[in-house]
Amino acid sequence: MSEQNRPRSIHMGLGAFHRAHQAFYTYRAEQATGEQTGIHAFTGRKPDAADTLAAQGYGYTLIERGADGDQLELIDTIRAASAGSDLDAWAGAWLVPDLQFVTLTITEAGYRITDADLPALRAEQPGSAMSRLLYGLQTRSRAGLGPVAVISCDNLAGNGEVLAGRVRGLAEQWDPTLASWIESSVSFPSTMVDRITPATTDQDRELATRWLREQGSAQTVDNMPVVCEPFTEWVIAGDFPAGRPAWEQVGVTIVDDVAPYEQRKLWLLNAGHSMLAYYGLALGHETIDQAMADPRCTDLLEALWSAAGEVLPFDDAEIGAACEALRIRFRNPRIRHNLIQIAGDGSQKLPNRTLGIYRARRAAGKPLDPGTPATLAGWLIHLGTDRVNDQGVAELISRFAAAGADTARSRIPVMLDFFGQDLVDDHELAKAIDDQLHALT
Ligand SMILES: NC(=O)c1ccc[n+]([C@@H]2O[C@H](COP(=O)([O-])OP(=O)(O)OC[C@H]3O[C@@H](n4cnc5c(N)ncnc54)[C@H](O)[C@@H]3O)[C@@H](O)[C@H]2O)c1
Ligand SMILES: O=P(O)(O)OC[C@@H](O)[C@@H](O)[C@H](O)[C@H](O)CO
């Protein structure tokens, strides 16, 4: 690749969502303005996605799956892909002089900092997402290159502030010179990101490959298409000291404060998803649309939404419109969104979602909402299965063992203590979880 065509953005976490969302918007902006941005995408943990995408020349098909049919489109804005562990490629991407921004979709768990991070940075062998990010920033700072924006696109409350806090904290411990460069040269915009993007299946790969061949495309195989719903939203607040694509021309909303949008999405969509995932799995369902056909799930979902609506900073009409859109989105029978995918990393997600609603209601003196005990009961049942995929749950599991708590019901007080003293003190909540477990098991 010539010096001129080197991607002016980096992405960490080459999963499905990045390809359906940020890469899609950047592609649209390139089409709208003719200005080339390009993305150098890095995998988070395994090299596979980079190898697969490189083998097919980086293009991939976006399959927009509506209730009535599919719209397919070849997206070509990713121009390089590398394994996250490839530190030479990583450093090289940060040395592009006109680099504008770095996006992240590394899941909630990717933001954790452990005792291993500082020694790894001192040895210049970063392994975690946060330490790699610091290493990249250090590379750019030492080269005397210009400022950059680093944008979290994960479903975290206050994702920009959380990311800034982690990066600044680690930089101060590692290298104060880097910390002051970050202070002057790096911005951390906050975002609300929304587009339901389930995991890709073999049928999707076959569909995309068939479609490419029918189109007479130069690319004849697609092992990395991505499926998503037609609905998409991106709300951003913050500075871009090195510029950015003209995203506002292609549907992105730029605001001063993203917090209300983010809270609305986390509490209506994501808390709803978590409830449907844990409660739905406990009832034997496998996908969101199956759970949406079960009144035991939808009654709880409606109760959760009205409880959240009472503590969200939007009027009834706006809450009503968001919930109506979600009813339609969740019922899309052609999006097979597996509950088990959504059930991952509950230890990291529940505090901002379900417990965010719960705490806001308690602080406002409002009664316990039925969604909280239902979600927590479903989660306890899930933790007793062999389907748990949670990068932050080890501590809770060892607390269960230390307490000799080996049934879902005996684990209630240990779980409440894990999430905070305010939950331990709430006897009504413990009883409601126990009642739910009684009903579910
Ligand atoms: N899929 C969606 O519908 C959707 C919608 C909105 C936001 N998101 C956000 O995007 C994230 C990723 O979703 P996806 O659909 O791409 O999932 P995915 O499973 O396709 O990809 C997950 C990505 O995160 C990386 N990752 C996981 N744990 C990591 C860690 N500890 N350190 C570094 N990287 C790590 C993986 O390597 C992979 O690249 C979600 O967790 C969420 O925060 C997803
Ligand atoms: O990956 P998570 O846990 O952040 O959330 C799982 C789903 O709720 C989520 O991926 C939604 O599909 C998404 O947030 C829609 O925009």
Image: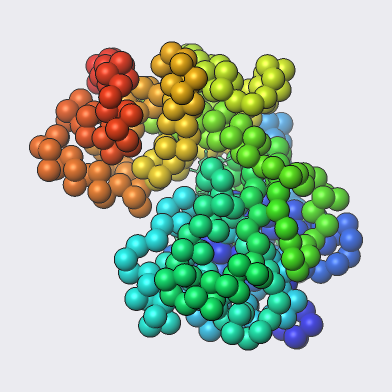
What residue is shown at x 63% (from left), y 39% (from top)? 259
Residue 214 visible to the viewer: no
The answer to whether residue 56 is left or right of residue 399 is right
What residue is shown at x 59% (from left), y 84% (from top)? 142
Q: Report x, y in % for residue 340.
A: 41, 39
Q: Report x, y in % for residue 351.
A: 42, 37
Which quadrant does the N terminus fall into? Answer: bottom right
Q: Is residue 258 above or below residue 35?
A: above
Image-quadrant location for residue 193? top right
Q: Report x, y in % for residue 254.
A: 77, 47
Q: Is residue 97 above or below residue 414?
A: below
The answer to whether residue 413 is left or right of residue 97 is left
What residue is shown at x 64% (from left), y 26% (from top)? 313
The colour scheme used here is: rainbow
For the image shown, how many numbered marks are present on the structure? Answer: 0
Q: Report x, y in % for residue 67.
A: 68, 31
Q: Is residue 71 above or below residue 3?
A: above
Residue 364 visible to the viewer: yes
Which quadrant does the C terminus fall into? Answer: top left
The answer to whether residue 189 is left or right of residue 50 is right
Between 354 and 343, the one nearer to me in the picture: 354
Between 218 and 254, the one nearer to me in the picture: 254
Task: Spot the residue most to the right.
Answer: 33
